[in-house]
Image (cartoon, grey):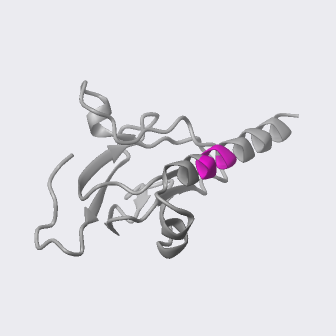
Amino acid sequence: MIRCVTAFISRLLSIFAICHLLGTASSPEAVASNPVIDIAFQSSAPYYEPTEAVVPMGTPIRWVNTTASFHSVRHDACIDEEPCPFQSIAIPPDSSFVIAPLPPGRYSYHCELHPIMRGTLLVLDPSSKEAGHDR
């Protein structure tokens, strides 16, 4: 029974993430022209693979949970009262979380359930010569 509920929740979260991605993309062509960048949860250090993901501007990002534990993705600014660029709920095993493309910048994030898990997104604008700043 628990396995069925977990599978149902996993599918529901995946559908929600896809709908969110499609609903915030500028057009279907934008989603099709930019492949999704995957970041995998790891059970041990470095915890996210890659630890620092370099992403071209306009590219959706997906965190994939292949571990046996629940994890989350929370931008560090969500802790303070700044704008929160992205934050997931607990992501079950064998599930993923997708966000729409982000503006250029450096985005530090962590797992709210396991604060030792930390990663960085570096979103680059190909037309800009600078690498972006902290967001």
| Stretch in magenta | 14-19
Of the pair 133 and 115, the residue shown nearer to us: 133
Number of labels in the image equals: 0
Q: Is residue 99 left or right of residue 20?
A: left
Task: State the residue lying farthest toward the front.
Answer: 27
Q: Quadrant of residue 110?
A: top left
* Rendered position, 113 above or below 92: above
**Residue in the picture at 56% in, 46% down:** 20
Left or right of 55 in this view: 124: left
34 relative to 41, above or below = below
Horizontal and vertical percent position of residue 112 = 42, 34
Q: Residue at x 24, y 75 (%)?
A: 126
Q: Is residue 35 visible?
A: yes
| Residue 111: % across, % down | 42, 41
For residue 41, say whether it is visible.
no
6 is higher (above) or lower (below) than 57: above
Q: Is residue 98 magenta?
A: no
Provide residue 4's location: percent of width, then percent of height. 85, 40
Look at the magenta stretch and give its main secondary structure. helix
Q: In which quadrant of the rendered image does the N terminus lie?
A: top right
**Image quarter of residue 122:** bottom left
Give the x, y percent position of residue 30.
Answer: 48, 67
